Image (cartoon, helix red, strand yellow):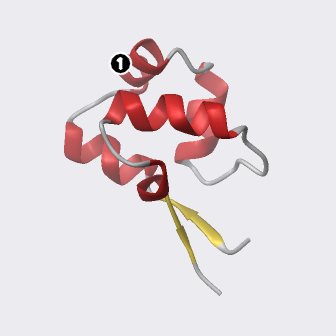
Amino acid sequence: MPFTSNLGKIMAEKGLTYEELQYKSKVAPDTVARARDGRIETCKLFTLEKLAIALKVEVAELFDWKR
């Protein structure tokens, strides 16, 4: 998959735990874990937006795309 998750790095930079991000974003725990570990294959833009807002970053910062 050409996408790489930056979620774990951003969470560490912000000092956020899974529980804190789940609470702030109101995203299901399994979705946060899969997104952080790069095990997510599909995700709604609305979900990515909720994570980005909770982390105070742009949606594009959540993932890197490599060809």
Residue 39 in the image: x percent, y percent? 69, 50
Query: In the drawing, does residue 59 fall left or right of residue 43?
Result: left
> Which residue is at 68% across, 75% downward?
2
| Residue furthest out toward the bottom | 67
Q: Nearer the viewer, residue 8 or 63?
A: 63
Q: Which residue is mark 1?
A: 20
| Residue furthest out toward the right | 42
Q: Amino acid at mark 1?
A: Glu
Number of numbered discs visible in the structure rendering? 1
> Which residue is at 52% across, 45% downward?
36
Query: In the drawing, does residue 15 fall left or right of residue 46?
Result: left
Position above or below: 16 against 43:
above
> Which residue is at 57% across, 39% downward?
48
Residue 67 in the image: x percent, y percent? 65, 87
Classify 10 Å Cα crowding around label 1: few (below 14), some (14-19), many (20 and above). few
Q: Nearer the viewer, residue 12 or 47?
A: 47
Element assignment for label 1:
helix
Position above or below: 61 against 59:
below
Q: Quadrant of residue 27?
A: top right
Q: Quadrant of residue 46?
A: top right
Residue 53 in the image: x percent, y percent? 39, 31
Q: Nearer the viewer, residue 67 or 40?
A: 67
Q: Nearer the viewer, residue 39 or 43?
A: 43
Query: In the drawing, does residue 24 fall left or right of residue 38?
Result: left
Residue 25 in the image: x percent, y percent? 46, 21
Q: Pick the quarter of the image with the N terminus.
A: bottom right
Position above or below: 41 against 30:
below
